[in-house]
Image: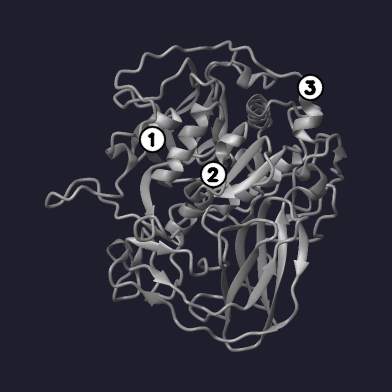
Amino acid sequence: MVDGGRATPTRRRTLGLIGAVGASGAAALWGIGWRPGGRRASAGLADPHYSGDPVAAGSGPDVSPRPLGRSPVAIENTRPGAAGFSLSGHRFATDRSGEIAGYASATSVAPGEELVLRVSVAPAQRYRATVFRIGHYGGAGARMVVQGPWLDGTTQPAPAVSPETGAVSCAWSPRWRLRIGADWTSGLYLALLSTADGHHHWVPFVVRDPSRTAAGLVVIPTSTYQAYNQWPMDGRTGASLYYGFDDAGKRAVAGRSRAVSHDRPYAGSGLPNLVADDIGFVQWAEAQGLDLAYATSEDLHTGRIEPGRHRAVIFPGHDEYWSTRMRSAVVTARNGGTSLVFLGANNCYWRIRFGGGDRDERQVWCDKVDTPRKGVVPVTPKWRATTSPEQQLIGSQYVSVVDGRAPLVVGASGHWFWAGTGVRDGDRIPGVVWGEADQWMSDTAGPQLVEEVQLADSPFTRKGKTVRQHTRLYRAPSGAWVFAAGSLGWTRTLHDPALADPRMDRATRNLLRQVLGGDPAGADQPVVARAARR
C-alpha cells in the first residue's frame, strides 16, 4: 500500500489559511444550537498504563437543545435522557467470581439486523439487559432505548486458550437476541447486564447506518479496545496483547498473547480501557448537534462502511491497532477528499491482521515483532517498520509516553484553527499533553500535501528527559484536511470538568466546522453545553 509519502518532504508552512465557513450552513449540517453553560461529563476509565477516575453523566443546569435542523442525531438528542444515568455507580461483578459477564456477537450492527448477547451468571439466577445510547440528551448523557425481560441465567463454560497464540475466547450459548429497529439512530450503545442479586456488567456495541451518508463518521477503536483487554483478570487465564499472568498470579509481559478475541467479555466493569474519552467525545459532539454516523475498526476492515462517503472521519481517542485494509480504506478516503481528524495520539501504530488470513474479524492478531527471524518477514510489525510509516497518513507519529501532564504550547495563533480563542504564540494551555504524545519526525517520510501548519510545540518530560509534542494540520492534494492532536489528553479538555478549557473547546469546534462544512449556532461562544457531571 502506498500513502503517497515522500522520503524528503518539501514542506510549506501556512499560518493564515482562509476557509472558515459562515453560520448560514449551520442548520443543515450541525443540526442543533446550544446555549453556553453547563458542566462536562467525564468517565476517566484508563488503560493499564494510566490512571483516571470513573465518573458518570448526570443531571445539571438546564441545557435543553434548540432544534435548528433535522439530522437524525439532532432529532435523537431532543428525546428525554435517562435520569440518573451512571457509568460507574453500580455494583460490578468481578472476573474472579463471574457473578455476571457478557459479550456481543458483533462490534457493530445495522438497523434490521440481530445482535446476540452471550451471558454467563454465577450462581445461576435471573438477569436482564438494559440498553442505553450515549449522547447529550439535555445533560443526561444517555437515553434508555430498551429494557429486556428477566431471563433465567446459567453459568457458561470456562474460556479456551489457544495453544498457538494464547488468545482467550469463549463459546457461550446465546442468551438474549436483540433486533435493531429501523428507528435506532447510529451511535455508541451500552447494554447494562443486571442480576437479580444486584451485580452488573457493561457490554458496548455500535449501531451503524450504511444507508445514510452523514457529514461525519466517528470510528470507535474496537480493535484497540480488544488489544488492551485482559479478561478474565483472575490471576491465571486472562491475556491481552500486553500482559498475561505468571505462575505467581502476577501480571507479566512474558505471558501476553499474540492474538485477542472479541468472543469474550471486557475485563472488570465491561467498559474497555480508555473508552471514557470516546464516550466523552460523543457526549460533547452530540451537544453540538453534529451530523454524525458511527462505525468500528472492523467496519473499516470489512468494508461494511465506506469512509469516503463522508466529509470527514473522526478518530476520537486512542486508535493504535490498524489492519492493512483499515488503513487502505482511510487513505483512499483522504485521497478522494474526505478529511481526517485524529483527536488522540499513538494512532495507527501497530499493523494487525484479523483471524487466520484476514477472514475472521473476531480475532485480532499482532505478533509485535519488527525484525525478521530466520528469514521470516514479520506480518504484524509497527507500521513505521514497513515502507508506510504512520506519519505518511497522519502527518506526525507517536514519540513517547508522557510523565504526568504538561501544557500545550500554542503556535501559529493567527491560523483559523485558533480563531476566537484569544490565544497568542507561546500561550500555555494546562494539562493537555498527557498519556502519550505524537511528534513530526523530520527523518521519517511524511504525506504529500499542499499546505501545513504546526499548531503547537510543547515540551514534556519522560524519564527525566525533555521531549516535544506537536499538534499539526495539513491539507492533501485532494483538498482533504488531516488534523493530528498529538496527545491523548486532547479530548479530555472537552469532556472532563477538571481539565475543561474554553480555548480547546473553541479550537476543536473551529476544526469540525471546517471539515464538516457547517458552523454550530452560537459559534462566537467559546463554551457550549455538554453532559453534566453528577
Is residue 345 found left or right of 82 in the rendered image? left
Task: Answer with the quarter of the image where residue 465 lies.
Answer: top left
Task: Answer with the quarter of the image where residue 310 lies.
Answer: top right
Query: Which residue is labeled 1 in the image?
Result: 390
Foreground disc of the pair 2, 3: 3
Toward the bottom, the furthest residue is 124
Mark 1 to mark 2 CA distance (whole Å)? 16 Å
What is the three-letter code of the residue carrying label 2? Gly
What is the three-letter code of the residue carrying label 1? Glu
Q: Sort mark 1 into few (<14), some (14-19) or many (20+) by Cα contacts within 10 Å.
A: many
> In x, y percent, where is residue 112?
70, 60
Task: Answer with the quarter of the image where residue 54 lies.
Answer: bottom right
Above/below status of 423 relative to 278: above
Is residue 497 found left or right of 269 in the rendered image? right
Q: Sort mark 3 into few (<14), some (14-19) or many (20+) by Cα contacts within 10 Å.
A: some
Mark 1 to mark 3 CA distance (whole Å)? 35 Å
Query: Residue placed at 59% from the left, 52% from the top?
Result: 276
Q: In what quadrant of the picture does the N terminus appear?
A: top left
Q: Label 1: state its secondary structure.
A: loop
Question: Residue 477's mark?
Answer: none
What is the three-letter code of the residue carrying label 3? Ala
> In x, y percent, where is residue 129?
69, 72
Query: Which residue is labeled 3 in the image?
Result: 23
Foreground disc of the pair 1, 2: 1
Query: Which residue is labeled 2 in the image?
Result: 317
Query: Residue placed at 49% from the left, 45% from the top?
Result: 318
> In x, y percent, where is residue 441?
35, 27
Sequence-wise first label, 1 or 3? 3
Q: Label 3: state its secondary structure.
A: helix
Q: How many marks?
A: 3
Query: Residue placed at 36% from the left, 25% from the top?
Result: 5
